[in-house]
């Protein structure tokens, strides 16, 4: 089976975290609305995932606050 958790911020989905092939996966949407996935299997990938989350949060803030 597949387990997933959606993480939301200010009512918008930031990313989905799930397990696939026994590895944690971060799924998110790019600026062009394409879907992307990142396998979080070491410290560097975890740091990259944190940066993606921060960028997504800033984008949500800009969209909601109207500051483009």
Image (cartoon, rainbow, N blue to C red):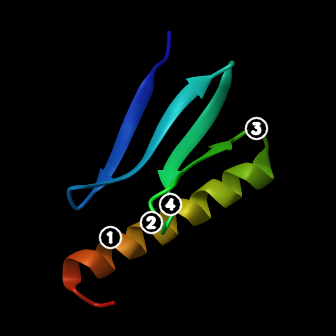
Disc assigned to residue 18: none
How far apart in space, not on screen, are marks 4 and 1 (Cα)? 11 Å
For the residues labelled 1 and 2, say whether their Cβ atoms are less than 8 Å apart: yes
Q: Position of residue 53 (x, y in %)?
A: 50, 60
Q: Which residue is mark 2?
A: 56
Classify 10 Å Cα crowding around label 4: few (below 14), some (14-19), many (20 and above).
Answer: some
Q: Is residue 58 left or right of residue 42?
A: left
Q: Nearer the viewer, residue 31 or 39?
A: 31
Residue hosting label 1: 60
Q: In which quadrant will I find the C terminus?
A: bottom left
The residue that mark 3 highlights is: 41
Element under disc 3: loop
Label 3, label 1: how many angstroms apart (C-alpha)? 27 Å
Q: What residue is rendered at 49% in x and 16% in y?
A: 2
Which comes sooner in the sequence, label 4 or label 1?
A: 4
Which-is-in-front pick, marks 3 and 1?
A: 1
The alpha-carbon separation of the residues under discs 1 and 2 comes to: 6 Å
Q: Earlier in the sequence, mark 3 or mark 2?
A: 3
The residue pinned by badge 4 equals: 53
Q: Are marks 4 and 2 in contact (CB under 8 Å)?
A: yes
| Residue 56, percent from left and from top | 44, 66
User: In the image, is 19 to the left or to the right of 4?
Assistant: right
Picture residue at 51% right of the left edge, 62% below the top:
30
Of callouts 4 and 3, the N-terminal one: 3
Number of on-image labels: 4
């Amino acid at each position: 089976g597949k387990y997933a958790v959606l993480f939301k911020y200010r009512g918008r989905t930031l990313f989905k975290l799930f397990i696939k092939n026994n590895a944690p996966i971060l799924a998110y949407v790019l600026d062009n609305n394409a879907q992307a996935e990142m396998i979080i299997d070491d410290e560097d990938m975890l740091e990259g995932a944190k940066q993606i989350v921060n960028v997504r949060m800033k984008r949500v803030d800009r969209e909601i606050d109207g500051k483009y």
